[in-house]
Image (cartoon, grey):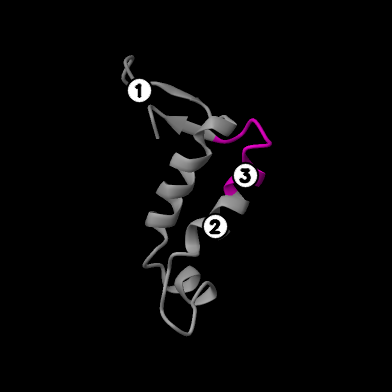
Amino acid sequence: MAPDMDIRIAQSDDLREITNTVARAFAGDPLWGWAMSREDGRTDHHELIWELFVEGALRYRSSWILGNG
């Protein structure tokens, strides 16, 4: 690992950045896309759903983040 990498345990202040990253990462996923689909095809609700998962994970000191997200 490079010595200049800032790896740390994620905090509640990181919620938005992590949620945004996860929502974008799974936007085209065949399972999550289907599970979160809406009849009108909109995806603006995905971040709200992922935020629940991320917020739950941040309660534990096992969620890590690299740099600024």
Q: Is residue 56 covered in magenta?
A: yes
- As displayed, is residue 37 above or below residue 39? above
Question: Which residue is at the front of the view, 63 or 38?
Answer: 38
Identified by mark 3, the residue type is: Glu
Q: Do the residues bearing badges 3 and 2 touch, measured as CB atoms within 8 Å?
A: no
Identify the residue at horizontal 31%, vertical 20% (top origin): 2
Question: Mark 3 and mark 2: span between their CA atoms?
Answer: 11 Å
The C terminus: image quadrant: top left
Residue at which label 2 appears:
48
Residue at which label 1 appears:
1
Nearer the camera: disc 3 or disc 2: 2
Image spot of residue 33 (x, y percent) = 45, 72
Q: Residues within 10 Å of mark 2 (few under 14, many from 20)?
A: few
Image spot of residue 48 (x, y percent) = 54, 57
Identify the residue at horizontal 62%, vertical 52% (top origin): 52
Disc 1 is placed on an element classified as loop
Q: List the single residue furthest toward the top.
A: 3
Which of pointers 1 and 2 lies earlier in the amino acid sequence?
1
Residue at which label 3 appears:
55
Disc number for residue 37? none
Q: Residues within 10 Å of mark 1 (few under 14, many from 20)?
A: few
Identified by mark 1, the residue type is: Met
Disc 3 is placed on an element classified as helix
Question: Main SS of the magenta segment?
Answer: loop
Image spot of residue 29 (x, y percent) = 41, 67
Q: What span is in magenta?
A: 54-63
Nearer the camera: disc 3 or disc 1: 3
